[in-house]
Image: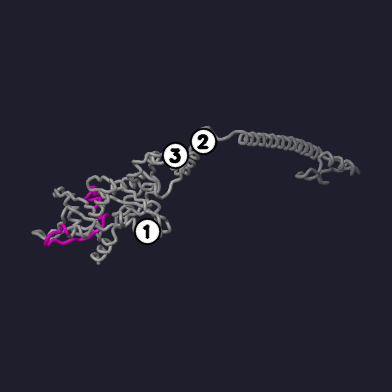
Amino acid sequence: STLLCAAALAIVGTTEGFAPISSSSCRSVGTTTLPSSEAISLQHQRALSFTNLQQVQSHDTSSCTSLQHTTTTTLQMSSNNENNEGPAPLTAIFISLVLLFFIVSAFAPLLDFASFQPTNQDLNLSDAVITRQDVNNNNEKNEKLKNYQSKFDAVSVTRIQQKLSNLPVFYIVNNGGDDGTTMQENIYFSYNDAINASGEGNVVKVTTLDQILYPLILKRGELFTPSKTTPIEVKNAIASIKSSESTTTYKLIPSAAALTDAKETGTTLKPNDIPLFSIARLAFAGTGGQPQVPLFLERADGITSYTRLGKSDEAVVRTTSLLDVLESMERGTRPGVGQLEFYGNAEDLMRADEMSR
């Protein structure tokens, strides 16, 4: 009986999750214990259930293996696509255009300057100013500079105004029937010339060129805003022009010495223009150590400055005019034109300083 129970146990098995048949499931036949029909039937059902479970587990395992293989294959194909294919054509074109824009922006200043640089000749500080001598001298460099223009050399109106503030100008205030705040039309660069023209009872006052050039002379008042330093007479004149009530035409009057210099050097002038004089190989140290090219209102001041530097040779004088320089600054028609600075007559500068106290 012990062997039969062991055989029954072997048929059912002791697979994990199923309990073995207990001894109470066997009935005794004499001295031999045999399994009952109910126990055999139950054992058969359990055996079938175990076989079905094994088939189900085998099917699930096969399905998982198949799914894993499919997923691996899909991922491998996606990876291959990413490795073998670049960005979409439109994206590549867009990226290329962006890179091209930044490259062009970075090198534009260099290209702009190089395109106008004189052939086989180096530029120097004296080339920053357009002189009448350059116009009459048709060498290779001057021909190239004749067409030069660069926005990187153009000077802003604000900075031009700062340069003009170095030059004092004198005007006459009528001492007549008004409130004493009306200025005459002539504006002088020389104090002595203003005194000689003032007449009895009138007053000579001082301001700087930046206060009157754009609003009164050039009639470009939109580029000038009166400030606390603007004299009341100048403010009234600007307001009168804006309201179209004034018929006065304001004029710049060069000093008598400057007019003589212009005549002797053959420098022709337009209305309201002022002769300016530069000296070859003469430069001063400006703010921050930057060199600056001086433009003098009178030839004698330029020659004196050149001599004080210990130069033994004769000074080479070149001529230009205020309106020519202003146009060159605004348009950037000379390399380094922003390094030009205006220098007034020493005596007039001291007189203006005394009158402003």
Q: Nearer the viewer, residue 81 or 269?
A: 269
Residue 54, percent from left and from top: 75, 37
Residue kind at label 3, given as amino acid type: Ser
Question: Residue 36: x percent and y percent?
Answer: 82, 39
Mark toward the viewer: 1 or 3: 1
Q: Around disc 3, counting alpha carbons within 10 Å, would you say few (fewer than 14), some (14 to 19), or many (20 or more)?
A: few
Q: Which residue is mark 3?
A: 115
Dot placed on the residue nearer the N-terminal end, 1 or 3: 3
The residue carrying mark 1 is 307
Residue 343 sits in quarter: bottom left
Q: Quadrant of the C terminus?
A: bottom left
- The quadrant of the picture occupied by the N terminus is top right
Q: Label 1 amino acid?
A: Thr
Label 2 neighbourhood size at 10 Å, few (<14), some (14-19), many (20+)?
A: few
Residue pointed to by mark 2: 91
| Range covered by the magenta-colored residues | 196-221
**Residue 205 magenta-highlighted:** yes
Residue 167 in picture, x, y percent from top left: 28, 57
Which residue is located at x 39 percent, y 38 percent? 143
Mark 1 is surrounded, within 10 Å at the Cα level, by few (under 14), some (14 to 19) or many (20 or more) other residues, namely few
Indicate whether 62 appears above or below 283: above
What's the CA distance linking mark 3 and mark 2? 34 Å
**Percent x, y for residue 281?**
40, 52
Q: Amino acid at mark 2?
A: Thr
Q: Which residue in the rendered view is the most extreme toward the right? A: 31
